[in-house]
Each structure stands twice: as C-alpha cells, then as structure tokens.
Image (spheres, coloured by chain):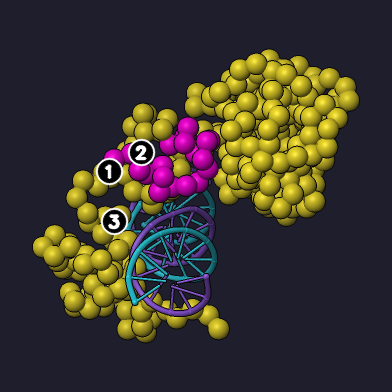
Chain colours: A yellow, B cyan, C purple
Amino acid sequence: MGRAPCCDKANVKKGPWSPEEDMKLKSYIEQHGTGGNWIALPQKIGLKRCGKSCRLRWLNYLRPNIKHGDFSEEEDKIICSLYVSIGSRWSIIAAQLPGRTDNDIKNYWNTRLKKKLFGKHYEKQQQQLVRRGRKIKSGIGNSMAIVFDNQGIYNNNNNQSPFLPKLSPALNSPPPPPYANYQPLQFHSNSFSNTAGVIDDLRRTDSVLQFGMDGASCQPVTSTHVGELEKVVYSNTPSFDDGLQFSCDNNGLNLMNDLDWGEMSSLISAPLYPSMII
DNA sequence: AAGTAGGTCAACCGCTTTAAT
DNA sequence: TATTAAAGCGGTTGACCTACT
C-alpha cells in the first residue's frame, strides 16, 4: 500500500497561482509565520491549495529578498564550481547564493548554464545519442551523465570552459602502453600535489569505490584522500554493471575506506570526459 | 501571417530525510 | 527503538513565450 497523500487531491487547486492567492499567503505568513505546519496552513488561510504547494510558492517566489532575473558572472562561477564538486545538490548550491532559490538555480543550470559550460556540441551529441536510441549509461552518482563513445569522442580540450581546470599535459599526449587504445578520463580536485604509485585497479562495488595500487588488490577508498587522486585516468572497462574499472596514476593513496561513488564522481569533470558507447 | 520548434520557468510528483511521538 | 507524518529535495512536466521557417 502506498503512502497516504498529504492532502485531498480532489479538492485542491493546481496550476499557476493567482495574485489573490499570492496575497493571501504572503500576508498571512508575514503576520503569523508558517506555524511550523505547512499542511495546515492553506485551511487556516482559506486557500484550496496543497500545503506543499504553499511552501513551494513561498520559498520560490513570495518570501522576501528573492532575486529573480539574470545571474551574474560571479554567480555562474559559484554554481559551476559547486556543481563540479558536489553535483546537483541544488539546495546546497542555493545556500551559497543569497536570494537565489534551488529551483531557480536548477532551471538556470538545465536551460542555460550547462550549455554555456559544455557548449552546443555537447548538447547536440546528447540529442543525437538519444535519437539513435543508443544505450546511455549515466549512473555515476547523480551528478554527471557520462556517455561512453569509442568513436565520436567528445573532446573539449580546445574550447575549455574557464570554470574547469586545465587539462594536464598528459591528456594532450597519447596514453602510454598498455592503455594506448583506452580513452583518457580526468579526475580533478583543488588539492592535487605530488604523485606517487600507480592505481591499477579501480572499481565500484555497490556504493563503495575501491582500488588497488601497485599490484595490490582492491580496497575501499577514504574520502580524506580523494583530493589526492592524480588527474589522468584511463578507462579500460566500459562496464558499469559489475564495477567500473580504471587504471591511473595516483598520488600517495594508501588509507582507504568509506568513499561513496557519488563523492568520487563529483571529482570527475564531465566536459573533459571522453567516453564510450557500449 | 501562420505554423512549428525550441527555450524558459513555475509548479507538480514522488522519494528521502527529519522530527515528533 | 519503531512508527508516522511533515518537510525537504531533485527530477520532470507542461504552459507559455519567442524565434525561426
């Protein structure tokens, strides 16, 4: 049995809010607050709206100091850098931008910023892939859709976004054997420093990312070492089903546990991410 | 001028998390 | 500690608008 609905669906109004409804909700909340109970609010005011709808309307439109309209260059940068590091956690991103709502930022990202950042080429490729009905694997966390394509590689190297880190020199030259036929992938973080060792087995098992280095078997990764992963990663196994495997250079990783795949994936910068269609 | 395609954004849906009991 | 309901959240939808043919 499903969960009970939060309101009587048959008796609530849906769709756009009228100015009268806005006024009722706004003036009530300004005078009395929400009372800590959105569900009860519409009845008190005499609005035929779901409590959730009232909450959304207030948060996204009616509450004071909401900023609408164009985003500044500075805001763009904040959104992009946060998206790259934490993915689509809009409420967290919105918390860094006073006056902006998560819904606004989400819409802005989906309709404009993504294109601005990734370019038209990326959009077109996505559309073509969908049209061709090819299988797109996008399961890396919830943040970035990664499409594997062993023919038409998307490479943003010559048109790189100012919001993303520069490619490491290694990405501009062919990968060394035995990865000559593999596609370079990139992890990035602000805290790269020295490099040491080689990760030769990196895989996801359930929600835990694991890798082994210098011939050692897979072990879980600690989040404290995430930032130390080296930039260049070569994919050799386009299989998400039983673990995505990479080989890569790394950076002094040794203690490993409790890094979930979402955290890891947030370190992957999609525009630089050549991929393979399976 | 009319029809169509694409873009935008407010609002909804349903799942997850949190808080109260 | 378990259960329940509300709040929070992100993905998706669809109405409206604009640009293009």
Q: Residues within 10 Å of mark 2 (few under 14, many from 20)?
A: few
Where disc 2 sits, the SS reads: loop
* A113 part of magenta stretch: no
- Per the image, the residue denoted by label 3 is A59
Residue A184: in sight, yes or no?
no
Whether residue B14 is situated above or below residue A116 in the rendered picture: below
Whether residue A139 is situated above or below residue A271 in the rendered picture: below
Q: Residue at x 69, y 23 (%)?
A: A252
Measured in 3D between alpha carbons, the distance from the residue under mark 1 to the one under mark 2, in whole angstroms, is 9 Å
Is A234 placed left or right of A270 in the picture? right
* A80 part of magenta stretch: yes
Where disc 3 sits, the SS reads: helix
Q: Do the numbered discs 1 and 2 sit on residues whose CB atoms are within 8 Å?
A: no
* Three-letter residue code for mark 3: Leu
Whether residue A251 is situated above or below residue A146 in the rendered picture: above
Chain letter of disc 3 in the image: A
Chain letter of disc 2 in the image: A
Measured in 3D between alpha carbons, the distance from the residue under mark 3 to the one under mark 2, in whole angstroms, is 16 Å
Q: Residues within 10 Å of mark 3 (few under 14, many from 20)?
A: some
Q: Give the main secondary structure of the magenta stretch.
A: helix
Which of these two is toward me, A147 or A243?
A: A243
Quarter-wise, where is residue A272 in the image? top right
Give how far across and how far down residue A30 sits, in percent. 13, 60
Give how far across and how far down residue A173 sits, in percent. 76, 16
Q: Residue at x 29, y 56 (%)?
A: A59
Give how far across and how far down residue A154 sits, in percent. 68, 33
* Three-letter residue code for mark 1: Gly
Chain letter of disc 1 in the image: A
- Per the image, the residue denoted by label 1 is A99
Q: Which residues are magenta?
A: A79-98
Residue A96, numbered circle = 2
